[in-house]
Amino acid sequence: MNFFIKTFGCQMNVNDSEKIRQLLENKGLTLCSSEAAADIIIVNSCAVREKAQEKIFSYIGQFPSAKKIIVAGCVAQVEKEALFKKKVKIDYAIGTHQFYRIGEILDKIVDGRRAEAAAAFNRQWQELVPAVQARSSRVSGYVSIMEGCDNFCSYCIVPFTRGREKYRPMAAILREAEYLAGRGFKEIVLLGQNVNHWHEANGGRTFPELLRQLARNVPVPWIRFITSYPGYHDRELLQVMAANRNIARHIHFPAQSGSTRILKKMNRTYSRAQYLKIVRAFQAAMPEMRFSSDFIVGFPGESDHDFNLTLSLIEQVEYESIFSFIYSPRPGTKAATYTRELAPGAVKQRLYALQELQARIQLKNNRRWLGKVIEVLITEKHPKKTGEVIGRSESYRVVNFASRTAIGAFTRVKVTAVGPHSLRGEEILKSADA
Ligand code: SAH
Ligand code: SF4
Ligand code: F3S
């Protein structure tokens, strides 16, 4: 039997899909490169915004009923049996904490058992490490260090889709990272909803110590981590980063809003002033430090003044990149009960204004690179242009250039043109290669 996995949502889901793929391949099933040839389609779903959730139903709706459809991930976790009442045909729903049971579930489906949902949370960490061949990248190795979220930001469904925080043991994290480094991965990306809240039980070691151990013992050029929650910032992190040059000078540090009043309503536990203070401390410890962020616009009660505070925060931090979203009420969250006064058109205007400001900042920052040489890791071939590759700088900037250097190598590129979203340049080959 053949299967296909379609992944929506964040890196957590990408990582879970890799694990699902490995479990099914171990069972003797074959992964197909397209839906058409697959007997079973696994849809790893995201529930973070309404649109993300709706997308999965239009996706499933296109398939003939002979195909077996399994909905996995976040929508399966929160919707459970309600999924089978939708207009589209679904054979099984398997929540975020149950996917290790996928083999057993497939046997049931093949036996023709009726639709079922498995969505219970387990309290134990599930130690499932995907083999190298099941990984979606051979360059960036994703290593899950924690699962779930205890923060309950008032707009967010993730604590409901992923359950409470659970932390993976340090020894297992180190083992996986060393394994990847030994197989030629060039960067290790630590994954979790609040990576900087990772800790051992009973006052044991915390995230800065985990990073220190990784930086010292794992021979990879870049160590990254996503996502850090500003409310859990610990000064020791700055010392560890500053002392270890193989930790990339880039942090995804979602602010969500620049207004302390709105941050409070969002149940984020830091103020604008505290956030900026942390950013300045990073920059003081490491002048080359760069930031990226997520922002939500149109949160209930966001006034013009609050929105302007978000814009001014963006101007002050000069982020490398930003993900910006229109607030989407999620069932069961606290903010879903708040009244929204702003018309959808006005919220869209705010989103465009924010994106326009950020594009201006990125263009200004990128122009500083014109004529200079930037070091990049070649992560992939350009999907459309033959002979071209895509590289990523330490701060995750996209650099496009023509190259015959292998994917996964570091190289130097002289920047010849810039836009707001990427740089373009010419590779500087070492004299021996030229
Ligand atoms: N754990 C991560 C984020 C997970 S969700 C963190 O705390 O940063 C990714 C992003 O989606 C969030 O940072 C937020 O900007 C956005 N988001 C989450 N819930 C949302 C909602 N209800 N409406 C709009 N955007 C939302
Ligand atoms: Fe959601 Fe907040 Fe947890 Fe991030 S920290 S996953 S935004 S509840
Ligand atoms: Fe979406 Fe679940 Fe990630 S809701 S953003 S796939 S944790």
Image: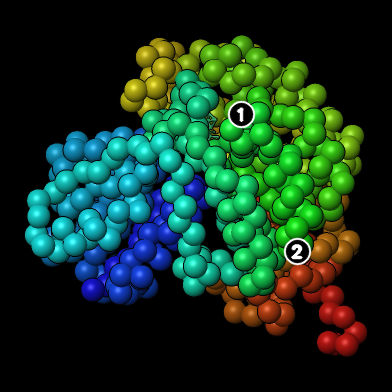
Residue 209 appears anywhere in the view: yes
How far across and how far down the image is residue 284, in percent? Answer: 89, 34
Q: Where does residue 420 sit, x and y in percent of width and height?
A: 70, 50
Residue lying at 55% horizontally and 32% vertically, measured from the top left: 351
**Mark 1 or mark 2: which comes first in sequence?**
1
Nearest to the observer: residue 8 or residue 15: 15
Does residue 356 show up?
no
In the rendered image of this protein, does residue 84 appear above or below residue 204? below
Q: Secondary structure at mark 2?
A: loop
The answer to whether residue 387 is above or below residue 160 is below
In the current view of this chain or complex, which residue is farthest to the front? 202
Q: CA distance from mark 1 to mark 2?
A: 30 Å
**Count of all numbered marks drawn on residues in the image:** 2
Residue at the spot 83% in from the left edge and 30% down from the top edge = 280
Q: Quadrant of the C terminus?
A: bottom right
- Please state which of the two labelled residues, at mark 1 or mark 2, is closer to the viewer: 1
Reading the image, the residue beneath label 2 is 219
Query: Where 434 sits versus 221, above or below?
Result: below
Residue where numbered disc 1 is placed? 202
Q: Nearer the viewer, residue 291 or 296?
A: 291
- Discs 1, 2 touching: Cβ within 8 Å: no
Residue type at tag 1: Asn
Q: Quadrant of residue 267?
A: top right
Q: How is the image coloured?
A: rainbow
Image quadrant in which the N terminus is located = bottom left
Q: Local crowd at mark 1 within 10 Å, few (<14), some, or many (≥20)?
A: few
Q: Where does residue 232 sit, x and y in percent of width and height? A: 66, 27
